[in-house]
Amino acid sequence: MGVEGKVVLVTGASSGIGKATAIAFLKAGSRVILTGRRAEQLEEAARTAGAVPETCLCSAGDVTNPDDVDALYTAIADRFGRLDVVFNNAGISLPSTLIDDLSVDDWRRVVDVNLTGAFLVARGAFALMRRQDPQGGRIINNGSISAHAPRPGSAAYTATKHAITGLTRTLSLDGRAFNIACGQIDIGNAASEMTDQFRTGIPQADGSLRPEPVMDVAHVASSVLHMASLPLDANVQFMTVMATAMPFIGRG
């Protein structure tokens, strides 16, 4: 089916994976809503893709704020009348920190963005997709390979990413009655602002600090576009895309 003409929401679209994926959708002919906290970066991403106003909406906001998320979905419904795909991507991480050195404030900040934010975005998408005509759509959650195996000192990040897997499975089950598909992409070492440290050295399970291979973020964007291109009677439930030589298989 492809993604041309589909209405697509990308969260965390001001940088990294979200920005690259939003640009890829725009270049593929989708109508794209870019959201993130930094309005200037959203506009810059739209310009990079050569987007025109008829195919693009940049909406700055905070995914942890229910009012911002509600306003976002109102804007989508008013502008495009429906929503076909959500890439539920916004997230943050922390430096490697043992759990007894992890502050409650930092724990809550990561949970708020990575889990509560993902819940609010998924909830709004589900509501719109359930009630639009024709009914249905697709939610793609960014899980991370930390949804499978942790890095050292990553209690908050890893806990949220394991929780995303539970959210994905629940949305997949609850969405069946409404033609709403949900899948998860688990990404490892895509080159972005979040992974700059990987090139110089990152803590390993044996206590050492070593650099790790990274891959071009374009490979993540193309993978998300593939998931989004399927008809709603087919679904990529879980996909892992990673730098081939990174220490994931056999981690630890």
Image: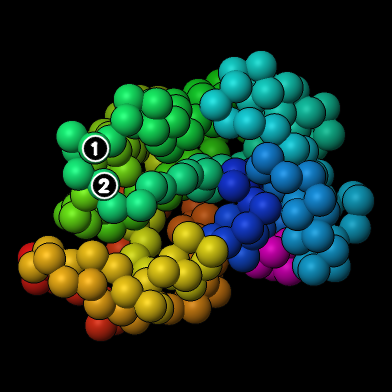
Instruction: State the residue in front, 216 or 228.
Output: 216
Q: Is residue 180 left or right of residue 165?
A: right
Q: How many marks?
A: 2
Query: Mark 1: few, some, or many residues within 10 Å (few <14, many ≥20)?
Result: few
Which residue occupies 25% across, 83% down? 245
Instruction: State the residue in front, 149 or 7.
Output: 149
- Tell whether position 24 is magenta: yes
Element carrying mark 2: loop
In the rendered structure, which amino acid carries the disc numbered 1? Asp
Query: Mark 2: few, some, or many residues within 10 Å (few <14, many ≥20)?
Result: some
Q: Quadrant of the C terminus?
A: bottom left
Question: Mark 1 touching mark 2, by CB under 8 A?
Answer: yes
Image x and y of residue 161, in percent: 31, 43
Can residue 161 be seen in this snapshot? no
Element carrying mark 1: helix
Q: Is residue 77 above or below residue 89?
A: above
Colour scheme of the picture: rainbow
Which residue occupies 59% across, 47% down? 12
Image x and y of residue 119, in percent: 45, 27
Q: Quadrant of the N terminus?
A: bottom right
Q: Is residue 133 above or below residue 213?
A: above
The disc at residue 212 is none
> What residue does disc 2 label?
97
Which residue occupies 74% across, 38% down? 60
Mark pair 1, 2: CA separation: 6 Å
Q: Is residue 7 left or right of residue 79?
A: left
Can residue 145 be seen in this snapshot? yes
Q: Which residues are magenta?
A: 23-28
> What residue does disc 1 label?
101
Image x and y of residue 189, in percent: 37, 69
In the rendered structure, which amino acid carries the disc numbered 2? Thr
